[in-house]
Image (tube, rainbow, N blue to C red):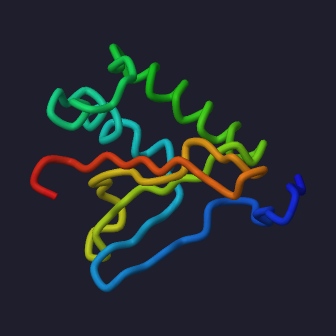
Amino acid sequence: MKHKGLNFNFERPPVLETERLLLREQTKEDALAVFKLRSDEEVMKYVPLARPTSINDIYTLMEEIHEGFLKEENLGWAITLKEAPDVLIGFIGFPKFDFANFRAEVGYLLAPGF
């Protein structure tokens, strides 16, 4: 989809790396970690979303995020440590775009201790 002056042209979120972090596409293997993260009262303290009641809520959420990505409505990454790329410690992304005004909302969740 093309937007006035903006577009992202990729089939999946690009992998991003820092010195110690790897930001990658969220996968179904992350579901249990996502459930734990989104069920944590401290993590969700300032996030005005309902907490999941089952792992199926997480699968539904992950599907909604993926569908939104395909429609170019959002973009996000699982946050992992480079030394443990299969262990999700958080999530960061752009849950909403405002292409007309060249803006995006940024959101993140981090597991306690990170």
The answer to which of 111 and 73 lies nearer the viewer is 73
Q: Position of residue 9 (x, y in %)?
A: 80, 66
The answer to which of 92 and 53 lies nearer the viewer is 92
- Horizontally, is 17 left or right of 64 in the view? left
Identify whether 56 is placed above or below 63: above
Give residue 64's quadrant in the image. Answer: top right
- Horizontally, is 42 left or right of 1 in the view? left
- Horizontally, is 87 left or right of 75 in the view? left
The extreme bottom residue here reads 19
Identify whether 23 is placed above or below 89: below
At a point 59% along the width and 51% down the height, the residue shown is 104
At a point 10% along the width and 54% down the height, the residue shown is 113
Identify whether 63 is placed above or below 101: above
The extreme front residue here reads 101
The extreme left residue here reads 113
- Horizontally, is 103 left or right of 50 in the view? right
Which image quarter holds the C terminus? Answer: bottom left
Give residue 39's quadrant in the image. Answer: top left
Q: Position of residue 23 (x, y in %)?
A: 44, 66
Q: How many marks?
A: 0
Q: Position of residue 18 (x, y in %)?
A: 37, 81
At a point 32% along the width and 52% down the height, the residue shown is 90
At a point 27% along the width and 79% down the height, the residue shown is 20
Q: Position of residue 58 (x, y in %)?
A: 44, 28
